[in-house]
Image (cartoon, grey):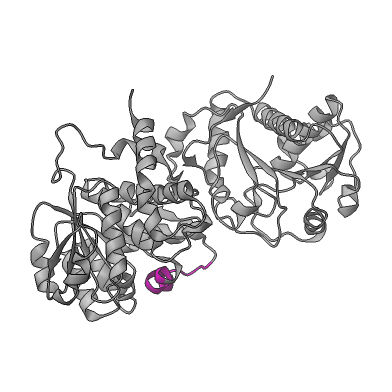
Amino acid sequence: MTTHWIEPPCELLTVSEMYRADAGAVARGTSSLELMERAGRALADALSHRWPEGRVVVLCGPGNNGGDGFVAARLLAERGRDVALALLCARTALRGVAAVNAQHWQGDVMPFGADVLCGADVVLDAIFGAGLTRDLDGAARQVVDAINDLGVPCLSVDVPSGVLGDTGRICGAAPRADLTVTFFRRKPSHLLFPGRALCGDIRVADIGIPDAVLDDIKPLHSANGPALWGRSYPVPSAESHKYTRGHAIVAGGRELTGAARLAAYAALRAGAGLASIVSHPDALAIYRAGRPSIMVRAAEDAAAFAAVLEDPRIGSVLVGPGNGISETTRAYTRAALKSHAACVIDADAITCFADSPAQLFEDIHTRDSGTVLTPHEGEFKRLFDSHSDDPEIGRVARVRNAARLSGAVVVLKGPDTVIAGPDGRAAINNNAPPDLATAGSGDVLAGLVLGLLAQGMGAFEAAAAGVWLHGEAANRFGAGLIAEDIADSLPPVLQALRSRLSPD
């Protein structure tokens, strides 16, 4: 019997949810012993495929990960591999199915220390699982450090030992795995830095847990991608016209005019039927000299801006990029939040409320339309970190707390951007290349979300889709990317997405 490998689904399971999935499988008739046997077989199959020759050192810990390691060691030995096994604890300390599988191992159990790595061609790291809660120390730390120092190829079980499954935090140290094999569903740490950087390639094995257990668990964490939001992605019909596709408004700054232009252009590329920049009359000439597809309107103050937003055909409004940190920007932001349109609040419009976040949150909570906040780490801390008692709660929990507090969908930008809604849903993005670290990239992202909101997408779905499209476009362009290239790289990405979502 060979392992069935799963194309990673979008659902992510926390440590506690994975325990529930295991229990759900047992309740439906699959024994814990069979689940461990299948997990160990998956490890043996993956290791044999990636490293078909050489001496294997299996490092087992005191929990079920160690039990998986015992199964893999037995199967590899039965296939004729040279296998050495070291156990972190005494055999008598093992419990349950891990103890049963330790009894099935007929080989020697070596002392746990760095010496066991001598002559190793590949290491199977089954020391600790995703539920670890303390820093590695003693022999475990010594062996992990030795794996990294020697550069021995490594396959980790579930997560590299020392990586927290829910947050991606590293507990002192963890091996740099070349391959990580996990079971049923990925964990948040497979997508969250710094743990993500240590996982190497990730493969998901089917070990017999039925998908039906998800109905009981109702996971709130997802990997971002079309499987998450594709059903609500707007595709124009034969009857569509520019107003049915939505009118997006961008508040334009008087000096830093490039930000608004990038955002408005991105909104059009994302599918908005119309995009207008509304600015003070002093800057109109600059905006009018830009792309002819972007309309320009004048507004001398927040009252005039609010009057523009009264048009019922306007679907979304963006405030912040290039607007400056001022009372004027605060007033424009509050005017946008009092309108009927879905709102994106970014950049300077976030920083303007650093000294009074409660005012911003009150305005958001009192509106009916969707609101998306798109801070980078610095802006996020200005608004939210004073409300977090524990700096170690993890990136996803921080953003989920912020979404509940503010009433908005919050997009915390970064290499592992997290999107969270007030309802508790959270998505982790993992397609963003390093090339996106360029000036104006965030303005384009805000514009993409704006364009999707204009077409009627829900706030959470529009934010998640915008983040994913941003990353896909950057990947398609590649090296040398600047902000202007992102929107120009979208058409083939959008065409591929439509083909993927088409029922035909």
Q: Is residue 386 magenta?
A: yes
Helix, strand or loop for the magenta stretch, by majority: helix
Q: In the image, is 16 to the left or to the right of 487?
A: right
Residue in the picture at 12% in, 61% down = 309
> Above or below — where is 247 with respect to 237?
below
Residue in the picture at 54% in, 54% down = 192
Q: Quadrant of residue 84?
A: top right
Q: Which residues are magenta?
A: 379-391
Q: Position of residue 440 (x, y in %)?
A: 38, 64
Asked whether 208 or 257 is in front, the reply is 257
Asked whether 448 or 77 is in front, the reply is 448
Q: Quadrant of residue 22?
A: top right
Q: In the image, is 67 to the left or to the right of 209?
A: right
Q: Quadrant of residue 101?
A: top right
Give the quarter of the figure containing the C terminus.
Answer: top left
Q: Residue furthest front?
A: 289
Let me know if residue 428 appears in the view.
no
Let me know if residue 313 appears in the view.
yes
Q: Position of residue 493 (x, y in %)?
A: 39, 41
Q: Position of residue 247 (x, y in %)?
A: 17, 52
Q: Is residue 329 magenta?
A: no
